[in-house]
Image (spheres, grey):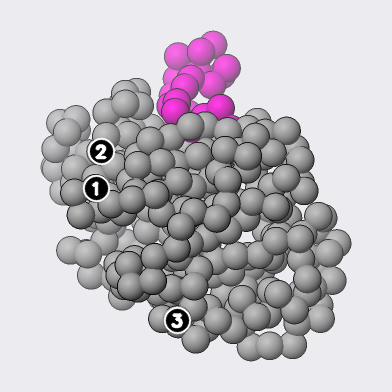
Amino acid sequence: MRRASVKSYAKVNLSLNITGVKEGYHLIDSVAVRINVYDTVRAVSRRDKLINVYMHGQGSECIPPEKNNAVRAGEAFVAAFGTAGADIDIYKDIPMGAGLGGSSADAAGVLNALAKMYKVREPAALKALADRFGSDTGYMLGEGSARMRGRGELLEPLSCPKRLHMLLFLPEEEVSSRDCYREYDRFPDPPRSDSEKLAAALEAGDFAGVAANVYNALGAPSARLCGGVFEALAAAASFSPPAFAVTGSGSCVFALFENEEFCRWAKSRYKGKLRTRIVHTLEKARQSRIFSPYALTEEEKATGIPDTDGE
């Protein structure tokens, strides 16, 4: 019996511009960072080809298996690489329907866990599989920051040497990405942030440059569809942070502050009903893993034994 456990981290879109439509899909230009919120994926091998996924937390137990991208990703992995199946437990801490990449994180986490357990070290093939399950699932295979273009499958890895601190405002309601894009199409919005400048500022550790280019074209459509998003935007604005925006298609809103103390100050003074959470971006050391999440560790190089007990 083999086992593997991985952490699959949430993301925040610092910028998200709509740059066009191709073959019925919206094209984006987005700079995304990973934050210290994650789902834990634990896999145990089976002797047959079956994939069983058991969800835990955040209301995920109600997701029908046929609509669960984690199940679909596991089945696609077995079909692509000819391995045996697995029993998989996913313990969720990433809020659902918040624009933090929870569904994509779970699909990517399943691919990472199975690849780790069955010693599949083919990043390009895994990336191709991941791209079938959402515009940011390929990005979610790694743990770093990146600029995403096209449908989200074109990735430019970025470093993030300066830790960014955010206060999240989390409405109870979820926002459908499909409905949000449709609402955007009713009132198109030309690109307002410069992702190239944002990417350069992120890599330079230039906080002011990052804050100056925070924007999400799906923010207004999301707020029109969901009163909770409108409330979250108003709550974030009330603290006059250097920048704030919706992430993904919502419903989560982040307020970007210069340090954790300002986040704690805002959280302590918020008297509304929305859930709040203080988060920060991942450490710089994780950034290089975006395209090679299966690189051998130093211990594995020395012993030849794959690490299947954790990250």
Q: Could you tell me which secondary element the residue under label 2 belongs to? A: helix
Q: Neighbour class for label 1 at 10 Å: few (<14), some, many (≥20)?
A: few
Identify the residue position indicated by label 2 in the image: 129
Q: Quadrant of residue 84?
A: top left
Q: Quadrant of residue 173?
A: bottom left
Q: Up-down: is 119 above or below 140? A: above
Q: Quadrant of residue 127?
A: top left
Q: Up-down: is 151 above or below 174? A: above
Q: Residue at x 70, y 61 (%)?
A: 243
Q: Neighbour class for label 2 at 10 Å: few (<14), some, many (≥20)?
A: some
Earlier along the polypeptide chain: callout 1 or callout 3? 1
Q: Up-down: is 105 above or below 173? A: above
Q: Is residue 215 left or right of residue 8?
A: right
Q: Is residue 64 left or right of residue 20?
A: left
Contact (Cβ within 8 Å) of mark 2 with mark 3: no
Q: Is residue 295 magenta?
A: yes
Q: Could you tell me which secondary element the residue under label 3 belongs to? A: helix
Q: Amino acid at mark 3?
A: Arg
Identify the residue position indicated by label 1 in the image: 22
Q: Amino acid at mark 2?
A: Leu
Task: Name the residue nearer the viewer: 5 or 266.
Answer: 266
Q: Residue at x 78, y 71 (%)?
A: 240
